């Protein structure tokens, strides 16, 4: 039981390049999330999904796209990377969206640097 | 618009003493509150939670207190241990979850 895994762990991009971050969970959770963590800002929600085939915008969605083609996978794409997207990205999943069943399980993170 | 605030970026305590981490929130609609713990190079892990219908929840050395009138949440760790050294995030949810900026706790032997 791996929980939540993220690929890759580290990546360096040049401005304007594109990439996709992959998140996978084996807990059969309906809800999945992408966050970014920046110093002094905590975790900010980028996009989330309430089930296979659905996506929705979070607090800071600009410059990112997501897809949830399979229940266990949630992809985060950067079409044209910018230095402001240098951050640590965390994927999370949960059984429900709030309350006692809304506990989120996090992946280990992806450290992205955009030069 | 930071709806969840942790105003102390860092806290240092001696092993065996009490650690108190504080969190304030602005949205009175939040109905569930959580604390997450994060070690370097790892993702956050759930620590303890409390529903808005309660004012205290205890789990071993960890106790979370909720003061709804003050919109204030605190985490008490007693006794503190060096292994508790980590970043602690406060989170609050109604439909989605909002996180504070985190407090780095250092427990000195």
Image: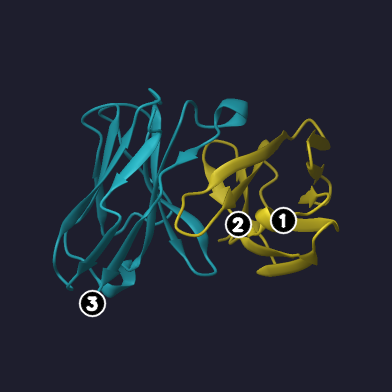
The reply to whether residue A82 is in sight is yes
Tell me, by letter, which chain the rendering colours cyan: A
The reply to whether residue B8 is in sight is no
> Do dots 1 and 2 share one subunit?
yes
Residue drawn 38% across the image and 37% down it: A4
Q: Which mark is residue B100?
A: 2
Q: Quadrant of the N terminus of chain B?
A: bottom right
Parent chain of label 2 = B
Report the side of B64 relative to A71 (left or right): right
- Judging from the image, the colouring scheme is by chain
Q: Secondary structure at mark 2?
A: loop
Q: Quadrant of residue A106?
A: top left
Q: Nearer the viewer, mark 3 or mark 2?
A: 3
Parent chain of label 1 = B
Q: Which mark is residue B23?
A: 1
Q: Which mark is residue B48?
A: none
Query: How far is the residue under mark 1 from the one under mark 2?
Result: 8 Å
Residue B90: give x, y in percent of width and height.
64, 51
Does residue B64 sit above or below B101 in this rendering?
Answer: above
Tell me, by letter, which chain the rendering colours yellow: B
Q: Quadrant of the C terminus of chain B?
A: bottom right
Q: Which mark is residue A115?
A: 3
């Amino acid at each position: 039981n791996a929980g939540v895994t993220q690929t890759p762990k580290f990546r360096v991009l040049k401005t304007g390049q594109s990439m996709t971050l992959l998140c996978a969970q084996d807990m059969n959770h309906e809800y999945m999330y992408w966050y970014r963590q920046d110093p002094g800002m905590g975790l900010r929600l980028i996009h989330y999904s309430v089930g296979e085939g659905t996506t929705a915008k979070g607090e800071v969605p600009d410059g990112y796209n997501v897809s949830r083609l399979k229940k266990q996978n949630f992809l985060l794409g950067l079409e044209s990377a910018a230095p402001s997207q240098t951050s640590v990205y965390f994927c999370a999943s949960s059984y429900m969206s709030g309350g006692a069943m809304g506990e989120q399980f996090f992946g280990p993170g992806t450290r992205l640097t955009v030069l | 618009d930071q709806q969840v605030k942790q105003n102390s970026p860092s806290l240092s305590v001696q092993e065996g003493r009490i650690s108190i981490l504080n969190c304030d929130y602005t949205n009175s609609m939040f109905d569930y509150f959580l604390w997450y713990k994060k070690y370097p190079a790892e993702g956050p892990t759930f620590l303890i939670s409390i529903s808005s219908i309660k004012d205290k929840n205890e789990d071993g050395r960890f106790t979370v207190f909720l003061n709804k009138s003050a919109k204030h949440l605190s985490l008490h760790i007693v006794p503190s241990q060096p292994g508790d050294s980590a970043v602690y995030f406060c989170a609050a949810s109604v439909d989605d979850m909002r996180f504070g900026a985190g407090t780095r706790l250092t427990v000195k032997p």
